[in-house]
């Protein structure tokens, strides 16, 4: 009567990730496993990250579970569908009931159910997984379980939404003992010189960025008590001794009251571990930056997405680009590393906006930055706005939302080159600021000019 919890991410099949080598455990599944343990439900978590699909299938065959619950997202969907079809069509696995959860299913219910899966869990997974498993094992009616979808006479039947868990102090800690945390730590250490672990302190995000999916936790804000977060950090410190922590929260400093309590608790409990987090510029000030530093923060990712106020406003980011720039500069001055995110190819973006982004990055001078070409995730405001402008809509089962393209100011290829232009111009500027070797500067500048020639852009004047 057991349930297997798993996903379909296979690190060694992903060429890009084999270069990056920064894997993290499946924290959502670990939370569900911990919750099921708290309710005396036999569950087996198979973390596929370091293994193959064949090894995963051998594990499921050996367990012969009553149900298999699989986490799916944008990146793993294609592998998840392949896994579903094998489990659904081969008797050696015992024909378990197949359950899916994750952010990609909410607005793709019919597509996922048509793959042969039995149930979808929409929203938070802990309570729904427990109730659904109890109904499956007892062969009871499941139509009264909130937050699920299934096929009924060929039509999608969705039950009323699950009420979000208000008090996150009721959540048990993620069941990290179910998997090999040491393997993650070793891979980080051998590839990057220090190990890292993830911790979640909040659910939901109160902001309305048009490109961001809120399919699981919704546009809400719920927080675990600061003392319990500090207790978890102390446990991780004593058990695994990681070199750093990555807080996976969308906006770590959204509540200044909570952050002050967190600062007090980690110091009081001797639970400080160096950490990095994400936040918004307007939720930082001199006092909060100092508290973050004292609590162990060594890097803050401060969202901007563009250096053009026109594009920031189009995204409904509700922030001033100069506020973002100053927040990054202040954080740098305090000795905390900074990171920022950039998105190009957003509807309406033109060459002038890209030039403004380059100017912003040079002036702000973040320690790190990442760039992506905008893509529409189903269910977001961005998707709704460009749906009638979609020019490329590949087969759903063999593609992801990243493969969707739409009418932009320029071609998709233009923005691919723009990414390379931004990276090289900004990196050249960094080398100038550092006073790097002249030959290195010449090499970086020549590379930049070559990329600009390919895009047909003029060199942005310094």
Image (cartoon, rainbow, N blue to C red):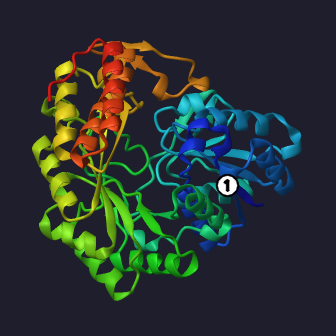
Label 1 sits on a secondary structure element that is loop
How dense is the environment of label 1, judged by Cα within 10 Å: few (below 14), some, or many (20 and up)?
many
Residue under label 1: 47
Occupied quadrant, residue 154:
top right
Residue located farthest toward the right when viewing the structure as drawn: 92
Residue at image point 35% right, 37% down: 440
Task: In this rendered view, identify the residue nearer to me: 250 or 44.
Answer: 250
| Residue 243 position in % (x across, y down) | 48, 69
Residue at image point 34% right, 59% down: 277
From this view, report whether residue 121 is shown above or below residue 110.
below
Residue at image point 47% right, 28% down: 401
| Residue 333 position in % (x across, y down) | 18, 61
Occupied quadrant, residue 116:
top right
- Quarter of the picture containing the N terminus is bottom right
Horizontal side, residue 25 vs residue 421: left or right? right
Occupied quadrant, residue 357:
top left
From this view, report whether residue 175 is shown above or below residue 77.
below
| Residue 58 position in % (x across, y down) | 84, 49
Task: In this rendered view, identify the residue nearer to me: 164 or 225.
Answer: 225
Q: Is residue 320 visible?
A: no
| Residue 200 position in % (x across, y down) | 43, 63
- Quarter of the picture containing the C terminus is top left
From this view, report whether residue 403 is shown above or below residue 125.
above
Task: In this rendered view, identify the residue nearer to me: 409 or 338.
Answer: 338
Residue located farthest toward the bottom when viewing the structure as drawn: 268
Task: In this rendered view, identify the residue nearer to me: 166 or 303.
Answer: 303
Horizontal side, residue 145 vs residue 177: left or right? left
Residue at image point 22% right, 40% down: 361
């Amino acid at each position: 009567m057991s349930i297997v919890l798993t996903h379909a991410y296979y690190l060694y099949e992903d060429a890009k990730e084999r270069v990056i080598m920064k894997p993290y455990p499946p924290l959502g599944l670990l939370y569900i496993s911990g919750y099921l343990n708290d309710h005396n439900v036999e569950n087996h978590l198979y973390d596929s990250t370091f293994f193959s699909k064949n090894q995963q299938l051998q594990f499921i065959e050996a367990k012969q579970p009553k149900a298999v619950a699989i986490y799916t997202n944008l990146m793993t969907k294609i592998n998840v569908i392949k896994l579903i079809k094998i489990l659904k069509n081969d008797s050696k696995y015992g024909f378990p009931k197949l359950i899916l959860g994750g952010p990609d299913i909410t607005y793709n219910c019919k597509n996922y159910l048509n793959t042969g899966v039995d149930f979808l869990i929409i929203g938070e997974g802990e309570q729904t997984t427990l109730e659904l498993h109890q109904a499956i094992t007892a062969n009871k009616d499941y139509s009264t379980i909130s937050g699920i979808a299934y096929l009924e006479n060929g039509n999608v039947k969705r039950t009323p939404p699950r009420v979000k868990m208000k008090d996150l102090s009721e959540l048990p800690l993620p069941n990290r003992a179910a998997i090999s945390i040491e393997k993650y730590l070793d891979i980080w250490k051998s590839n990057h010189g220090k190990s890292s672990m993830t911790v979640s302190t909040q659910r939901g995000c109160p902001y309305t960025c048009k490109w961001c999916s809120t399919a699981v936790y919704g546009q809400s804000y719920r927080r675990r008590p600061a003392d319990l977060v500090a207790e978890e950090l102390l446990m991780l410190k004593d058990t695994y001794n990681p070199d750093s922590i990555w807080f996976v929260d969308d906006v770590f400093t959204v509540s200044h009251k909570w952050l002050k309590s967190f600062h007090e608790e980690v110091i009081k409990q001797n639970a400080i571990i160096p950490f990095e987090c994400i936040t918004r510029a307007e939720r930082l000030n001199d006092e909060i930056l100092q508290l973050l530093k004292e609590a162990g923060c060594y890097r803050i990712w401060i969202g901007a997405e563009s250096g053009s106020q026109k594009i920031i406003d189009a995204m409904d980011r509700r922030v001033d680009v100069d506020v973002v720039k100053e927040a990054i500069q202040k954080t740098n001055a305090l000795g905390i590393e900074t990171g920022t995110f950039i998105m190009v190819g957003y509807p309406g973006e033109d060459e002038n906006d890209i030039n403004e982004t380059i100017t912003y990055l040079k002036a702000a001078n973040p320690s790190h930055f990442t760039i992506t070409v905008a893509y529409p995730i189903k269910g977001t405001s961005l998707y709704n706005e460009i749906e009638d402008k979609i020019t490329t809509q590949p087969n759903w089962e063999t593609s992801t939302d990243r493969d969707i393209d739409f009418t932009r100011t320029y071609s998709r290829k233009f923005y691919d080159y723009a990414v390379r232009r931004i990276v090289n111009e900004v990196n050249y500027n960094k080398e100038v600021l550092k006073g790097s070797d002249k030959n290195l500067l010449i090499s970086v500048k020549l590379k930049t000019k070559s990329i600009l020639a390919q895009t047909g852009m003029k060199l942005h004047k310094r």
